[in-house]
Amino acid sequence: MDEIDIDIVANPDLESPVLIEGLPGVGHVGKLVAEHLLEEKESELVRRVYSEYLPPQVSVGDDGTAALVCVELHALTLDGQDVLVLTGDYQAQDNVGHYRLTNAFLDIAEEFGVERVFALGGVPTGELIEEYAVLGAAATTEFVDELEGAGVEFREDEPAGGIVGTSGLLLGLGGRRGFEATCLMGETSGYLVDPKSAQAVLEILQKVLDFEVDFSSLEERAEEMEEVVNKIEEMESQSQQASLPSDDDLRYIG
Amino acid sequence: MDEIDIDIVANPDLESPVLIEGLPGVGHVGKLVAEHLLEEKESELVRRVYSEYLPPQVSVGDDGTAALVCVELHALTLDGQDVLVLTGDYQAQDNVGHYRLTNAFLDIAEEFGVERVFALGGVPTGELIEEYAVLGAAATTEFVDELEGAGVEFREDEPAGGIVGTSGLLLGLGGRRGFEATCLMGETSGYLVDPKSAQAVLEILQKVLDFEVDFSSLEERAEEMEEVVNKIEEMESQSQQASLPSDDDLRYIG
Amino acid sequence: MDEIDIDIVANPDLESPVLIEGLPGVGHVGKLVAEHLLEEKESELVRRVYSEYLPPQVSVGDDGTAALVCVELHALTLDGQDVLVLTGDYQAQDNVGHYRLTNAFLDIAEEFGVERVFALGGVPTGELIEEYAVLGAAATTEFVDELEGAGVEFREDEPAGGIVGTSGLLLGLGGRRGFEATCLMGETSGYLVDPKSAQAVLEILQKVLDFEVDFSSLEERAEEMEEVVNKIEEMESQSQQASLPSDDDLRYIG
Amino acid sequence: MDEIDIDIVANPDLESPVLIEGLPGVGHVGKLVAEHLLEEKESELVRRVYSEYLPPQVSVGDDGTAALVCVELHALTLDGQDVLVLTGDYQAQDNVGHYRLTNAFLDIAEEFGVERVFALGGVPTGELIEEYAVLGAAATTEFVDELEGAGVEFREDEPAGGIVGTSGLLLGLGGRRGFEATCLMGETSGYLVDPKSAQAVLEILQKVLDFEVDFSSLEERAEEMEEVVNKIEEMESQSQQASLPSDDDLRYIG
């Protein structure tokens, strides 16, 4: 096996496809979006990317068969818009790996004629969220303007530490290579898998790419998570009443 | 020295050999099985694999001579079945090393005409075990079926985190390269070297490969471990009586 | 992208330029100096150095556009003295990266005809500072003598652990390659961004390179930091009165 | 700079030289021995080994000049026995670096016609020591026998974890390359720099290589350390009387 080893599974002709990336990250927001698209739409696996920068690991399927960890690209169509969806269970495990794998992903995107890249992720707020904003960053001011029109928020100094990992590099390396790239980040507490944040990101994508997708399975999952959140809040409020003097003091608890 | 440096010690003609891997890991289950086979059967050292991915270390023998850390492959016969046994004191120390060393092991297996690979290990349960099940994963559904017939259990979502390290990659990379590969994992508490779990794995191997091996030395070692376990349990129950209210509460202690 | 990827933005003719390096480090002293020079003087961006040894990250500007993390070199003139200023938001993330990036920086310096290298940094004292000394180390005794004449202090066994990172290597690798190199380190508590320490280093640079620069913006920032320090000291003295027996004991608190 | 960069400072003709390695490690035993030989005998610097596997760092001399971290080889003569002494302030910082640097050291040894390699170090006992034994391991049984005759102890299962780092690899890689190699390890508590352990190792070297060296400076340093040890013991005995029931219990304190 080479450092990066790509299985060419299919080579469909795609018309002006966009790349949508959703790997695991904060709140699993990006991955939830990518998986939701693959569940709701018919798709075709086109590439498997294996690499020694991924964990030395197999995942085991329900039938007992094992598969080497990889990143997959599927082709699908969203109401006429061809899309390559990039997802998987792991990101690269070190800095060099992030750079090399992201470059490999962009090479594949180039092969298929991709011009626009949507890297998806979550941005942690550290607290439970009522209104799910979607923050953005993009390679060009033109793309910033277009996305702002679709409801994406661009805030000064946010996200504070910049954007790291595959999403950051798809934007950074992609921009340098001439892709029209953006990273869309759903606000999320950062503590839990967050289907509501994923839905907020999907709504932006719908506007920008002009398609519609059914949200019901995502909403169900959101309701399940909400029950978890409610239980946690209940437990927290009980323990706070027991050990803490007043609500005011709680403001300073990280 | 190259990145990976292989001493060719012997090149015996083997007839349809299988590869059995037992490197250190959870409960030392795989290593105990490999060592037991090497103790009970006559064997011939065929390869020593040195690598800068292994620790920078020598082990010192009883006669005061030192040997550079390596992984060894021995050839032996189990009631007519030729076998390559892969074992050693260490696995690779990082991700890239795991990929490259496992590929080197598969290259050697290929040279000897190996078609079937048995990677052995333990799966931690977190509690002391009465009935030692052997969990499995395999590269193909055919091999899953055959192993299930021999008593291997294939459970949905187990092992939860997939299989990591050399065993995982022998299965994952081996499967990709066309080997009929499996990973057999004896259940074990995960806290102690576990000869009973090793015996459970050996019993499966006996059925699948149709051979018999004497278990007495492994049973002795199991009895020694059992005494250790009993002492630990005794100490635990004393400390529990002292500090904990009831047995019911103990169920929730990890 | 290669391991190190250099954008050639401009190639101005520079006359006997010196290299001044100010990357993030102890007290951000070096970076404050480099940034102050870029704020006060007109400058021209000449190189962007991208590398997989830098974090896999983009920074996001106020207009929502993202830029891949890099190290930049700007050309400017300090009262007739041509200067290359090297700065950025990150240093290399591992040992090998430090060596390779520093060599790349020296290659660029060589291209522009640089003979003298000033690596800037801070040296932590562990306590708040009244008089800001600037410690030095240099590649040759001649340079040591010259810098001593300008007020740089050369103290036996300081800094105790040697000088690490890009600054250390610009001096060590630079010296080996024949550059007249020095590292100038402003004393700083090590706890806070320290504009006063940066001013002390700038004052040395003014003498050695014979230029003048306005300090007012740096002094403002120093006053802001002083308010922060005062608040911290106030809080400390209150908590000390509450829990500690006497001022004498505090001397031994790290 | 290459991965490993060797300055050829001098190329004296040496007659059947041996290599003595003393890099920093447990109790600094090996480094103390190497430094003592360099202090007591006239020596000539023959090689400086620079490498990106060493820390990215310069050390600063008393005259304010800085030198890139390196490993040095000096030639000297011990009563007619030519010797290459290998020492420095750092070992390699990772596994691969240990392998590659040690191979580079052995290449240099080969150039000078070295046949015997003495890697020196300390073996931690975890307690203060009365009688300083020197443990050994060697590449061949012949060398084991010779060293045993000189008072080196070869004990089953010691050192328990094998020998790691440069010393281990000089023995392991050296043995594979045909050097007559040994690692001599002075017993030491492991908590402090240990000149007494260094003296014990030197006494063995004197017997094996048939030379004499003045110990007085090492003895002085040992006395200084002894005072430190006495103070620590005093403090310990006081704190034990205060908080612990009896001396018997102390046996179990690690």
Image (cartoon, coloured by chain):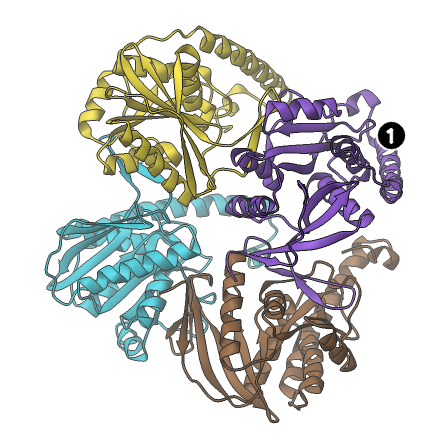
Chain colours: A cyan, B yellow, C brown, D purple
- Viewer-side residue, C151 vs B136: C151
The local crowd at label 1, few if under 14, some if 14 to 19, many if 20 or more residues have their Cα within 10 Å, is: few
Residue B187, how many percent across, how many down?
A: 39, 22
Residue B185 visible to an observer of this rendering: yes
| Horizontal arrangement in the rendering, residue A132 relative to residue D37 (left or right) | left
The answer to whether B12 is drawn above or below residue D226 in the figure is above
| Horizontal arrangement in the rendering, residue B82 relative to residue D91 (left or right) | left
| Horizontal arrangement in the rendering, residue C146 relative to residue C24 (left or right) | right
Quadrant containing the N terminus of chain A is top left
The answer to whether B238 is drawn above or below residue D69 in the figure is above
Residue C213, how many percent across, how many down?
A: 64, 89
Quadrant containing the C terminus of chain A is bottom right
> What is the chain identity of the residue bearing mark 1?
D
Task: Please tell me which residue is depicted at 70% across the width and 26% down the height of the picture.
Answer: D147
The answer to whether A116 is drawn above or below residue B154 in the figure is below
Which amino acid, by three-letter code, is at mark 1?
Gln
Residue A24, how many percent across, how many down?
A: 35, 51
Task: Please tell me which residue is depicted at 59% across the width and 59% down the height of the picture.
Answer: D56
Residue D227, how many percent across, how many down?
A: 89, 40
| Horizontal arrangement in the rendering, residue C168 relative to residue D201 (left or right) | left
Q: Quadrant of residue A234?
A: top left
- Viewer-side residue, B187 vs A156: B187
Q: Quadrant of residue A252?
A: bottom right
Task: Please tell me which residue is depicted at 44% across the width and 75% down the height of the picture.
Answer: C48
- Viewer-side residue, A25 vs C121: C121
The answer to whether C137 is drawn above or below residue B78 in the figure is below
Q: Quadrant of residue D252?
A: top right
Residue B126 visible to an observer of this rendering: no
Which residue lies under the disc numbered 1?
A: D241
Residue at disc 1, secondary structure = helix
